Amino acid sequence: MAIVDPFKEHIYQPVHHEDSDLESPTSSEFIEHKPHRKSYISLVWPWIASTITFALISAYLLFQQQINGWSTCVTASPAFRTDFKDSHPYISYEERVYTGRFWYNETIGKVYRDVDPSEPQYFGLPSPEIDAAWDDLLRGEFVDMTEEEAAPFDADLNTDPTKHHYHMEPDMFHSLHCLNAIRMKLDSDYYSQHMGHHQTFNQRIQESPHFPDDWSRIHMDHCLDQLRQSIQCQGDMSPVPLYFFGGDHIGLGVGQTHTCRKWGPMRKWMDVRKERDDERGGKEVHTNDDQHSHEMHS
């Protein structure tokens, strides 16, 4: 197929035919055809303009998707590289409004904490019901790791002396463990008399030559700092507007909607791992919150 250069000068020659009755035109009658560059550009310009417009729109939509990524991918966002690999299929997201917010009762003129009675209660005056809620929340706190799962960690990582298995605790449960320890410390008078199965672990801490005398304070400092870093790490930027009630100059922050990882699937993953651990054989390794012969601490 011939390719014609539209900007090259072309001179058309007459076609001679022996049987033609027509006279051949003179050279002066030839018409030189010189296409105009302006005419060519006017033909291709709409295509150039549409391509540029499409590219700009695509770039804008991609930019908006980056900005609004959480709002468009709330229910199924990929796990982070640092999440335990086996848990990845159980990680998803949802929007939630926190319970326990402050409100103002116009009738009695007092601020109160809003409590959802349909949800388990984890705070308040100490009671067996609250302790049971925490025991259920933290059940199976530590899970086994296979040798392959333990391989990326420090060479000094060793197995427990009873089962000879590697263990780990998801950091979310580490933070919950710390929060529960602080909760109990706030009501130390009550828990000094109602330690229950916690007493066994505390007794072993006191008897161990490897823990300092002021371990209780060191543990609290560790837990507070653990929670600080966890909160900063999550970096939740959901707005908490301040409401002013009763004419006071004191604003109360009332949380709104947050984007959260779904608790249910992650709790299910912990239970699945626990069942897998039991199938591997050996006695369960318990946390410092359980009344058994071998405990672990975080």
Image: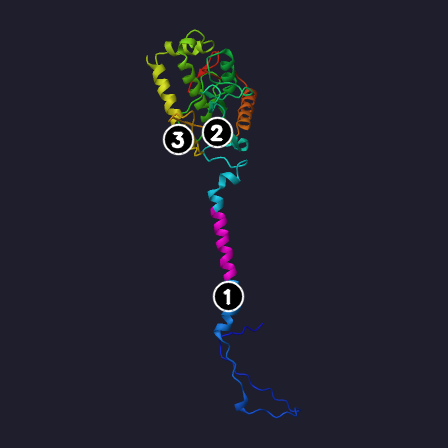
In the rendered structure, find residue 149 and report the number of the disc placed on it: 2
Q: Which residue is mark 3?
A: 232
State the CA–CA distance, disc 2 to disc 1. 59 Å
Q: How is the image coloured?
A: rainbow
State the CA–CA distance, disc 3 to disc 1. 53 Å
Q: Which residue is mark 1?
A: 45
State the CA–CA distance, disc 3 to disc 2. 27 Å
- Residue type beneath disc 2: Glu
Disc 2 secondary structure class: helix
The one nearer the camera, 268 or 156, is 268
Over which residues does the magenta segment extend? 49-63
Q: Is residue 267 visible?
A: yes
Residue at 49 percent across and 69 percent down: it is 41
Residue at 48 percent across and 51 percent down: it is 59
The one nearer the camera, 152 or 68, is 68
Which image quadrant for residue 214?
A: top left
Of the image marks 3 and 2, the number of the one nearer the N terminus = 2
Residue 184 x %, y %:
42, 14
Foreground mark, 2 or 1, reads 1
Which image quadrant for residue 271?
A: top right
Residue 52 x %, y %:
49, 58
Q: Determine crowd level at label 3: few under 14, some 14-19, many 20+ residues with C-alpha closer than 10 A.
A: few
Disc 3 secondary structure class: helix
**Quadrant the C terminus occupies:** top left
